[in-house]
Amino acid sequence: MRTLARWLVDERGHHRPVSDPAAADTYAIRGYREVGLAAVGTVRASWHNHRTGAWEKGLLLELPAAELT
């Protein structure tokens, strides 16, 4: 993940890689946080749960380029 974030910043000119996993996806969120992404908010009804048919919230995470080490 860190390699991808570095590539997005260095090669593609992105200044703030973001991700929006389902808020209940603790494994994905843990992985993004280990890379350095931080939660900045939630997005309502952004993920469709195919098992229940309900729309669930997502967690918006970001890593400003200046904080990428």
Image: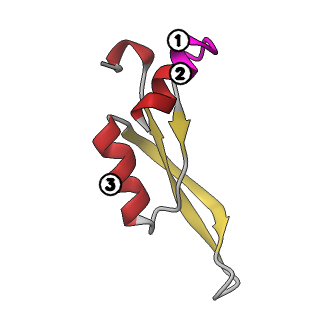
Circle 2 sits in a helix, a strand or a loop, which is it? helix
The verdict on residue 12 being magenta is yes
Q: Mark 3 belongs to which amino acid?
A: Arg
Q: Position of residue 46 (x, y in %)?
A: 65, 59
> Distance from label 3 to label 1 (Cα)?
24 Å
Residue 8 vs 31, above or below: the answer is above
Q: Residue at x 37, y 12 (%)?
A: 66
Left or right of 60? Residue 13 is: right
Marks 3 and 1: which is nearer the front?
1
> Distance from label 2 to label 3 (Cα)?
21 Å
Q: Position of residue 6 (x, y in %)?
A: 46, 21
Question: Which numbered circle lies on residue 7?
Answer: 2
Residue 26 vs 66, above or below: the answer is below
Q: Position of residue 51 (x, y in %)?
A: 64, 87
Residue 59 vs 52, above or below: the answer is above
The verdict on residue 9 being magenta is yes
List the residue tagged with mark 3. Answer: 30
The part of the chain drawn in magenta is 8-15
Q: Residue at x 52, y 11 (%)?
A: 10
